[in-house]
Image (cartoon, grey):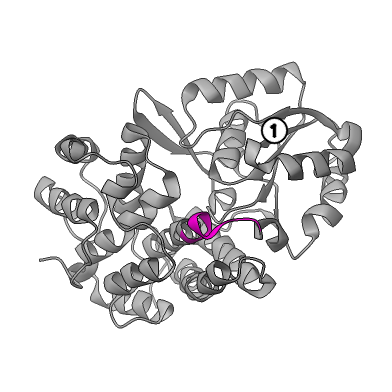
Amino acid sequence: MQNFTYDALPVRVIFGAGTSRRKLAEELERLGVSRVLLIASPRERQLIQELSLRLGDRIAGIFTNVRSHVPIRIAEEAREVARQFKADCLLSIGGGAAIGTAKAIAMVMPLPIIAVPTTYSGSEMTTIWGLTTDQRKTTGISRDVLPKVVIYDPELTFSLPPSITGPSAVNAMAHCVETFYVPNANPVSSLLAEEGLRALAHGVLLAVEKPDDLEGRSEVFYGAYLAGAALGAVGTGLHHKICHTLGGAYNLPHAETHTVILPHVVAFNQPAIPAIMERIAHAIGAPVAAMGLYDLEQRIGAPTALKDIGMKQENLEEAVNLIMEKAPYANPRPVDAAGVRSLLEDAYMGRRPSGAMA
């Protein structure tokens, strides 16, 4: 048995259909807060209205100007709104952009966060924050941004169309995959990741085929929770560095970028960690991890090519240079410009991985 350190994160998790409506007021009461800033994307308008009615005058203000990758100007605007409303709690409703905005506030104003995810980003279970300035996305770690409570209500995801459900679930799968081989990987986090992959791979097929199927939605949310918890305990690696670089520099959609890049990073690392890749393949029910991930993405109609999500071919060489700016990476296989270039070219064209990149 290997020696290891496992840093369990103190998040209260409430899981179940209807819990956002039944439990939210109770959790605010438990925290002793009374001036809540509700942070959500405009897409959640109906849910904002419903929860605002239920919570009444506990809602001091609402902020809906959220953006992917959290541009610094949005972060500063949100912080000023929190000050104006004298908020004593942040209620995040939505996907990664909403929780990212709440974290941007909490990192400078240590207010408790209650997160109610409506996608499968997993960010709500981590101490990781991210901000974008001048096309560069910077990430960091702070206990101040870790939510106090996360409420997983599968009913809130019924309205997610397959075009969002699929990439969001694969984004969570990327969290699981990297958990296996980052420097802080340990047996506990790997168990979480393995179960998370199994639940995500099985559940997303149901959720895409039948969006209002409670069992499928619950399984994907369960997998996303495990993915976030695993990643939050050990940190990120090459895959996330590439995706954060591309997203910040070219404003590519977050989950879709993770979806496109994941099979290619897995193929890149396959020769260095074959036993781990066998474990990943087994969890998703595939003979080979990289090809299995790519084939799953095709089955659920998720994007598989950078050219289809806004990346321009003329920016590939610049992207290689931006990624290599932060090298060396703690990665199972040494990372050089030639390897990154080959990886990005395959991802740009949407080529099916052959199983292992030489």
Label 1 amino acid? Leu
Quadrant in the picture for residue 138: top left
- Asked if the magenta segment contains residue 165, the reply would be yes
Compared to 47, does 205 lie above or below? below
Q: 138 and 357: which one is in front?
A: 357
Residue 101 lies left or right of residue 257; in this view the side is right
Residue range (magenta) = 159-166
Residue 239 lies left or right of residue 358; in this view the side is right
How many neighbours does mark 1 have within 10 angstroms: few (below 14), some (14-19), or many (20 or more)?
Answer: many
- Name the secondary structure under disc 1: loop
Quarter of the image with the C terminus is bottom left
Compared to 334, does 136 lie above or below? above
Q: Is residue 258 visible in this depiction of the protein? A: yes
Q: Which residue is mark 1?
A: 111
Q: Residue at x 66, y 53 (%)?
A: 11
Q: Residue at x 79, y 59 (%)?
A: 19
Query: Residue 277 appears at what percent x and percent y?
Result: 30, 74
